[in-house]
Amino acid sequence: MASHATSTIQDIFVKAKSEFLGELKDKKNKSELQKACTVDDIWAYTAKLQVEQGHERRLRGLQKIQPYLERLQEYAGVIEVFVQVKPDILALIWGSIKILLQSSSNVTKCFDAILDVMKCLGPALPTFNKFTPLLNANERIGYVLGLFFKDILDFYLTALNFFSLKGNSIQGIE
């Protein structure tokens, strides 16, 4: 019975992944998503971005997304163990962040907006490590983890599709 429930929970993640990739307008982003598979990849990219922005005298304070990344790291750790998701599922979380930062970094208002959303979402996410004991006692928690995954991907999808609009005049937003 437990293996059936685990399989069903894994199906939620696979379905969310499939829907996300199917609705992603810029198809080149699909291959880019796999280039950041861990939070360490994001930290390395943000450090590089900070250096670039420093040279151009346009630092944006990327440290404000630290709580968001930390909570997502907890979440990724929990679903990795409890749901036994594959790395390609987690790459959607980390790869999307990297693409969003890359896509918006040249337009200050858009970049700031993405950072502000992540800054607000960080404290709003639960401290997933506190729920780890509940996961082993209640399989329904796995479904909740799947809903979080879908919500995270919905946020990324909306933002990524905005940046991939044809004829998008975000350059004029500054």
Image: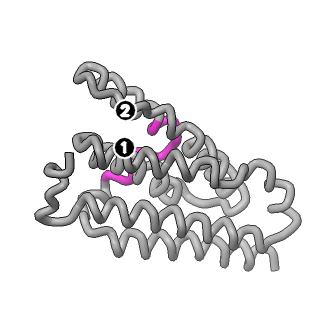
Hey, what amino acid is under mark 1? Answer: Asp
Label 2 – label 1 distance at C-alpha: 7 Å
Q: Residues within 10 Å of mark 1 (few under 14, many from 20)?
A: some
* x and y percentages locating residue 94 in the rendered image: 47, 49
Farthest left residue in view:
167
Q: Residue, x 11% and y 64% (percent of image)? A: 167
Q: Is residue 36 magenta?
A: yes
Q: Is residue 91 left or right of residue 85?
A: left
Q: Residue, x 59% and y 48% (percent of image)? A: 122
Which residues are the magenta region? Answer: 32-42
Q: Residues within 10 Å of mark 2 (few under 14, many from 20)?
A: some
Kindly state the secondary structure of the residue where label 1 is placed.
helix
Residue 60 disc label: 2
Hey, what amino acid is under mark 2? Answer: Arg
Evaluate if marks 2 and 1 touch, with contact meaning CB atoms under 8 Å apart.
yes
Q: Residue, x 66% and y 57% (percent of image)? A: 79
**Residue at which label 1 appears:** 112
Q: Residue, x 47% and y 52% (percent of image)? A: 117
* x and y percentages locating residue 109 in the rendered image: 29, 46
Kindly state the secondary structure of the residue where label 2 is placed.
loop
* x and y percentages locating residue 162 in the rendered image: 28, 63
